[in-house]
Amino acid sequence: MSIVGGLLLMMASVPETLTGVATATTLEGATQAITREPVAHYEIIKQIGENGGGFFGFNSAHPLENPNGFSKLLETWAIISIPSALIYTYGVFANNVKQA
């Protein structure tokens, strides 16, 4: 799930690079350092494992962790995948899938 999710997040424009910091000039003329590191695979593991926090420390509110609607949908699916699987597993162990 992590490999496929990481690839899908990379396709959804979540950064996955080892080039490091990019320097940009703001409208006021100051320079700004933009961190671009391997975010996609950390992000999907964080969402599947529900480990909290984010790569940038904003809990998926940072624009590079969640750039569009598809990435939000994928991350939401990742968050609910394990709890919903556990409900089904309860039904299998109870030998009554209707209970799940």
Image (tube, helix red, strand yellow):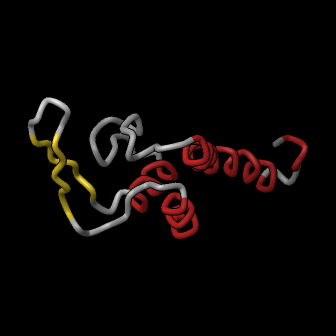
| Residue at 30% from the left image edge and 48% from the top image edge | 55
**Where the N terminus falls, by quadrant?**
bottom right
Placement of 97 over or under 69, stated as above or below: below
Quadrant into which the C terminus falls: top right
Taking the image as shown, residue 90 lies to the left or right of residue 36, namely right
Q: Nearer the viewer, residue 49 or 53?
A: 53
> Residue 49: x percent and y percent?
47, 51
Which is more toward the observer, 94 or 45?
45
Residue occupying the point 34% across, 44% down: 54
In front here: 51 or 68?
A: 68
Q: Is 89 in front, or is 10?
A: 10
Answer with left or right where residue 18 lies relative to residue 85: left
Left or right relative to 73: residue 92? right
Q: In this view, does 96 lie above or below 29?
A: below
Does 89 sit left or right of 22 as displayed?
Answer: right
In the image, residue 81 lies at what x, y percent? 64, 50
- Residue occupying the far top of the picture: 28
